[in-house]
Amino acid sequence: MLLTGALAGSTMAVTGTASAASGAAAVAVVPSGPGTELPAASFTQMTVDDASRRVWIAGDRVYPDGSRQGEVIGVLYGGAGPAVASADMAAPLSGVAVDPTGSKVFAGQSDHIANYSHENGSLSPLDPIPAPADDCGRELVHTGGRLFFTSRAPASPEGCDDPVGIGSVGVAATADGDGAGEVMYSYTRVHLEGGPGGLLVTAPERWSPTDDPDLGIYRVTDGADGNVLEFLGERRFAEGGTGPGMDFRDADFSADGSVLAVADGVRGTVLLGGQDARFLDNSYAPLPEGVAPTAVAFSPDGKWFAQGGAGSGDAADLTVAFADPSVERQPLRIAFDDEDAGRRVVPRGMEFSGDGEQLFVVTSNQEGTKFWLHTIQTREALAPSSFVDVAHGPAIAGKPIRVTGRLDLDGLAPTETPRVTVQRMAGPDVTDLPPVPVAEDGTFVLDDILPDRAGDVFYVLGYAGDEVHYRAEHWLHVNTAEASGTVTRGRR
């Protein structure tokens, strides 16, 4: 296994910067470093476990003799415990889900759902969950307190793409005695996506370019009326039966459930009402021309929206933008173009951490036989901030000193009036001074009384950042002189 403790807990820095000026052309940037190579030779699904701070990924390993083994792995991205949790199962393995407490992990097998208890990186098998036969790749989603999964067995030698076969969406029984069963049927493979408040999307694959699958949005209920799902809305993408239907790649709900983003192979990113599936205007910057959409993700904190794709060369395969499209800033763009780090974002290969501070991205090589996990720090998408023109006046021990400067907030107006925090360091003495307000033009003035003893004094100026700007810090060195001596100006 190539996942090691050192790699699994690491983060991905980004070289270069995206353009911060509104309306300026964004610059594609490339993650520095290879990411973490996964042992799997296949990928079906990933999920983020916020309770245990792990990224769970399901796939199959292929050995030199051609044999395969299913493996679910959980890569730690914070907290305590082993860097990698894993469990071996029969191949093919497809789909992975975790309950909100992080105490149970589920993985799809061809004749059941594997069920594991999870504690601090240790997986212990529990009784399997019954499920209809599946040879086409399950998807699993835990939403509204219930586990949902897909099943499909080929009906003919044509296999999983044969529209004659029948697949289903099922629900597992709960510990409280809520029953299991099939909640709907489909003639094609179905993809699932969960959302806040028990939302559930069902998105059938199209079996031909002229097929027009019907995407459905539901809400999980208590089942008191015998129905586990409440129907909210449906959407066919072809207009009036003309043109190609939905070519589904991925979907994700916004943090409040009001928007459903769908990555469509024909149309790019399509936005729908999260409660009724109506078409919405899309104000997000699209992926570059020639980059096929593969994945979408909203951050659970409501701040970020990411679009992933498969491009070539230095075309950006990933964009990270503010979820609020009214924030006029070019998105951070990242290109994956490294044979040792992946060349494209795989379908359904993106998820945010619960706090929105990290975006986990699975990439693959051109052939789709090797996979890597990347961790993108979303702060890289914030506009930069910096201290400039910082200077000080005469520096005499025990006397007043004035420090002036400017806080440069790139491109965007701050979301609230900024303040500069100040810390004075004189030998072993560290003093927190009152914050200094920043004027509309970014300038600020700090007035202070220097310590009585001459020598080196440091002022640490800080800006905590805001919703659109990254934090900044500046150290000012002041060399103070005795009152009767020569006044010395400190280095800037």
Image (spheres, rainbow, N blue to C red):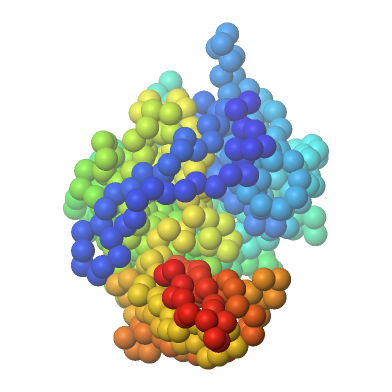
The quarter of the picture where the N terminus appears is: top right
Residue 480 found in image quarter: bottom right
Toward the front, the furthest residue is: 484
> Horizontal and vertical percent for residue 472?
47, 69
Nearest the viewer among 423 and 219 is 423
Q: Is residue 136 visible?
A: no
Residue 330 found in image quarter: bottom left
Nearest the viewer among 478 and 35 is 478
Q: Is residue 479 visible?
A: yes
Q: Is residue 263 left or right of residue 379?
A: left
> Horizontal and vertical percent for residue 44?
51, 37
Nearest the viewer among 133 and 388 is 388
Q: Is residue 131 left or right of residue 332?
A: right
Q: Residue at the spot x=34%, y=88% of the render?
A: 440
Q: Residue at the spot x=47%, y=27% of the render?
A: 370
The quarter of the picture where the C terminus appears is: bottom left
> Horizontal and vertical percent for residue 196?
56, 66
Nearest the viewer among 384 and 4 is 384
> Compared with residue 237, is residue 456 higher up or lower down, i.e. above or below?
below
> Horizontal and vertical percent for residue 310?
32, 40
Q: Residue at the spot x=63%, y=83% of the render?
A: 451
> Compared with residue 344, is residue 39 higher up or lower down, i.e. above or below?
above
> Compared with residue 274, is residue 209 higher up or lower down, i.e. above or below?
above
Toward the top, the furthest residue is: 65
